[in-house]
Amino acid sequence: MCGIVGYTGHQPAKDIIIDGLKKLEYRGYDSAGIALLEEDKIVVRKKKGKIANLEKSIAGEKFYATTGIGHTRWATHGAPTDANAHPHINEDGSIAVVHNGIIENYMELKEKLENEYNIHFRSETDTEVIAQLLGVLYKEKHNLQDSVYAASKMMKGAYTFAAVCDQEQDRIVAFRKDTPLIAGLGDGCNFLASDVTPLLKYLDQIYLIDNGEMVVCTPNQIEIFDEDYKPVQREPLHVNWSVEDAQKGGYQHFMLKEINEQPKAVSETLGRRLDEEGHVHLDGISLTKEDLARIHKIDIVACGTAYHAGLIGKYLIEKFTGIPVEVDIASEYRYRDPLVDEHTLFIAVSQSGETLDTLMSLREAKAKGARVLSIVNVVGSSVARESDDVFYTWAGPEIAVASTKAYTTQLICLYLLALYIGRLNEHITEEYAQNILGELKLLPKKIQKILDHSSKIENMAKLLYNRPQVFYIGRGMDSAVAYEGSLKLKEISYINSFAIAAGELKHGTIALIEPETTVIAIATQDFLYPKMYSNIEEIKARHAHIISLVKEGHEEISQISTDVIEIPDCRDEVSPVLAIVPLQLFAYYMARERGENIDKPRNLAKSVTVE
Ligand code: F6R
């Protein structure tokens, strides 16, 4: 949550920083601000609301600064107001700070600064503590980087921040703790940012900053220091994402663009892992037969949509490998003292690779001896860097807050992993594996077919967008698809929605079904089809509006439903990858009909780096 951008070079900094913040707005968008080093003073401008509000408020002003920092906020401490927006400054305004994370001991530090130094705080944020603390330390050290280093030793929690000082023109000092930070190496200019998207326009070489490291940026140099204040020598990383990848490309919303990118993304994720003979080759994973013999159970841990991918992963891995799998929500896992040891394979699933609960669960499992494998989209993210093996989803940048292509590519990674392990421990035959692989290879075309017929779903949304609630049911892997479909709908359309395993409905929840309640019944698992048929009959008897999601040609359920969505025929094992696509489109069109802010839904952020 929260996005940080820093620029130091020879161009006017304001526009570069604001442009960069717009690329990070997905990380939080309740207020934004900028601090510019104008000659001998720091000029701060900040505004509640989106970056456009900030831009509007400073449209008439001229700025000459070539160094500055900016921030887009997702509020944790203090409401989203102008006063609580970042940057925060110290008492005499000589130091400005932007911050991403939560300082756990900020109350203690605040009291100390108030009582011992008579400092008066102007905001309700924890971040102001950093600015005031740096102000006090600077008086003693007369140097920003020494002050930042000293401050970093006094704080607890997650505190990635960047600071500028009016006494040190052309210099930004930043520190990374538990939330992301990268430094970008330009030509006569250098950058700091929470992720790579603001930098793609300017450069393709970045430094990944590790936890506990401090970075000092001037126009001609980037210096990195470790926790002991020793200089770090590091090779820059080449980034191959293009600027177009991070733009809307003619679509009305990033979400629609990303839904439509799924055939390409799935094909990319698969293609990189199949050799010429069609065998699975897992780049980034070195799991041998001997390693596998030590694994007695697998824990998949993730949050939100990534957790829903994990639920499907459980079915796949247990079926293809015979190894028991537990799936857990990261915020639960990390506090339940899980039974983990060196016989556990821990799999973290995360698009951003920065979700704090997932990262902390990973650390917990690692400390207990588990082997850690991650399925991650963002290259070089914290989860990726702290894992023994990393399996990248290669979905390209996902900008819309609601995850779509990252989810489908997470599923593909789980199929490949399950097939690979299943062959390694010989739980499945080569013939069966080749059968499933054959089906996976057909998915891009089949997803495209669903997308080509999206107008049916668009028309359905035009009729249904005012429904107060939409429920989702399914059995087996379709129950996981139901959870994901329901999450997509509620997070962007704000329509009340829940999902439940269809067989569980009659144990209480069916009480909510009344005439005209909309129920989406997912029935793509052939072996569970008769069971779903009965569940749909139960709902029909209560006069609900039933939309069934079935494979092409499955007439029986269609006949008892109010409306039908079809997906191309396929084996049961791979249907979740197809079944989610119409549900993503349904959520998108429902939200669009309601006029909601689809790419940036209220109260949410793309990367959740708080607990
Ligand atoms: C919903 C969504 C979230 C994320 C969750 C985990 O559309 O995107 O539920 O899936 O916040 O994020 P990552 O995958 O970055 O760990």
Image (tube, helix red, strand yellow):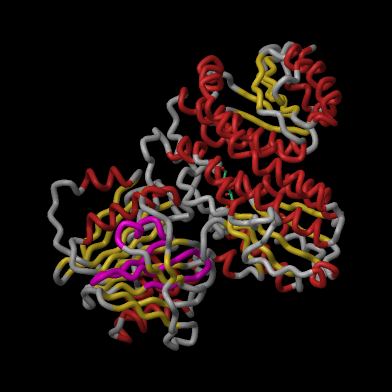
Look at the picture and state if 19 lies above or below 379.
above
Say whether residue 611 is visible: no
Query: Start and end of the magenta stretch?
Result: 174-202
* Quadrant position of residue 556: top right
Q: Which residue is drawn at 65% across and 61% down?
A: 374
Q: Is residue 12 visible?
A: yes
Residue 451 in the image: state x and y as whole percent: 54, 30
Q: Is residue 164 magenta?
A: no
Rendered location of residue 418, percent (x, y): 75, 54
Q: In this view, does 501 lie above or below 408?
A: above
Tell me the quarter of the picture where residue 366 sits: bottom right
Query: Percent x, y for residue 163?
Result: 33, 70
**In the figure, residue 423 lies in which quadrant?**
bottom right
Which of 139/23 is in front?
23
> In the image, is residue 496 above or below residue 302?
above
Residue found at x 50% / y 62%:
102
Q: Residue furthest front?
A: 277
Is residue 190 one of those drawn in magenta? Answer: yes
Q: Which residue is depicted at the point 55% across and 66% down?
A: 382
Identity of the residue drawn at 59% across and 56% down = 272
